[in-house]
């Protein structure tokens, strides 16, 4: 379970420019296995990871963030 976001900021994830309140996580405070569902931003010392709505990042043991599409988002996009 991730710690609470450090802050929230407005961010744009859609072509219409609509802003949404987005949690901002301090990556140095997350541990292996932490999962962050989008929309969210993870701030690391040298980069920021943007997780768009419908996707989830998981911090693995090698300090990488594999990002996968949520199952519901996959089904929603199928036609």
Image (spheres, helix red, strand yellow):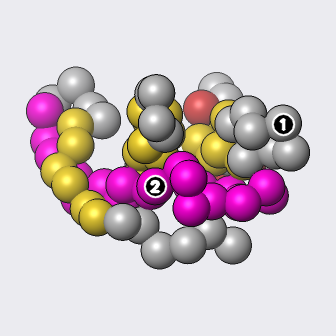
- Residue 11: which quarter of the image? top left
Q: Is 58 left or right of 18, judged from the image as shown?
A: right
In what element is the residue under mark 1? loop
18 magenta-colored: yes
Q: Position of residue 52 (x, y in %)?
A: 45, 38
Q: Residue furthest right?
A: 61
- Mark 1 lies on residue: 62
Query: Height in image: 2 above or below 62?
Result: below
Q: Is 45 left or right of 10, judged from the image as shown?
A: right
Q: Which residues are magenta?
A: 17-38
Residue shown at the point (60%, 32%) measured from the top left? 77
Q: Position of residue 57 (x, y in %)?
A: 65, 44
- Mark 2 lies on residue: 26
Q: Residue 65 versus residue 74: which sits nearer the camera?
A: 65
Q: Is 6 left or right of 54, judged from the image as shown?
A: left
Q: Position of residue 2 (x, y in %)?
A: 61, 68
Q: Earlier in the sequence, mark 2 or mark 1?
A: 2
């Amino acid at each position: 379970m991730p710690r609470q976001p450090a802050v929230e900021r407005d961010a744009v994830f859609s072509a219409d420019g609509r802003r949404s309140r987005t949690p901002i996580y301090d990556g140095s405070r997350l541990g292996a296995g932490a999962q962050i569902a989008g929309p969210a931003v993870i701030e690391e010392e040298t980069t920021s990871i943007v997780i768009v709505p419908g996707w989830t990042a998981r911090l693995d043991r090698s300090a990488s963030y594999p990002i996968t599409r949520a199952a519901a988002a996959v089904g929603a996009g199928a036609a």
